[in-house]
Image (cartoon, rainbow, N blue to C red):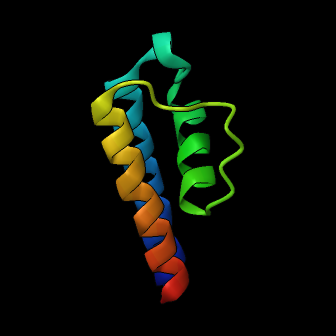
């Protein structure tokens, strides 16, 4: 439960950060949509329906992808 709660907190926080960084102009129209994107990114599913367009957003996305792989390794 602690692990699941930790991952949920990371996804909500980073999803909100991506909403602030990217904004509605880049497809991140709401915080729930951004959290959905964060979940698909961390779980390495990555549907590709929403993608970051800014350099900062891509850097955060890269960090989240590595975090997802690290989580799978644990």
Q: Locate the N terminus by quadrant.
A: bottom right
Question: Does 41 sit above or below residue 59?
Answer: below
Q: Is residue 42 left or right of residue 36?
A: left
Q: Position of residue 61 (x, y in %)?
A: 42, 46
Query: In which image quadrant can residue 51 be found?
Result: top right
Q: Is residue 55 left or right of residue 12?
A: left
Q: Nearer the viewer, residue 4 or 74?
A: 74
Q: Report if residue 15 is visible in the image.
A: yes
Q: Report if residue 1 is visible in the image.
A: no
Q: Is residue 74 left or right of residue 47?
A: left
Residue that protrudes farthest toward the bottom in the picture: 74
Q: Nearer the viewer, residue 5 or 21?
A: 21
Q: Position of residue 42 (x, y in %)?
A: 53, 60
Q: Position of residue 36 (x, y in %)?
A: 62, 42
Q: Nearer the viewer, residue 31 or 48?
A: 48
Q: At 42% across and 56% down in the image, what residue appears?
A: 64
- Count up the numbered dots: 0
Q: At 62% across and 61% down in the image, what residue appears?
A: 44
Question: Does 30 sit above or below residue 35?
Answer: above
Q: Position of residue 69 (x, y in %)?
A: 50, 73
Residue that protrudes farthest toward the top in the picture: 25
Q: At 45% across and 49% down in the image, what residue appears?
A: 12
């Amino acid at each position: 439960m602690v692990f699941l709660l930790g991952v949920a907190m990371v996804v909500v926080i980073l999803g909100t950060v991506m909403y602030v960084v990217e904004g509605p102009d880049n497809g991140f129209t709401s915080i729930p949509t951004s959290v959905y994107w964060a979940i698909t990114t961390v779980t390495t599913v990555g549907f590709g329906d929403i993608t970051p367009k800014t350099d900062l957003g891509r850097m955060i996305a890269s960090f989240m992808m590595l975090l997802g792989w690290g989580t799978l390794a644990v």
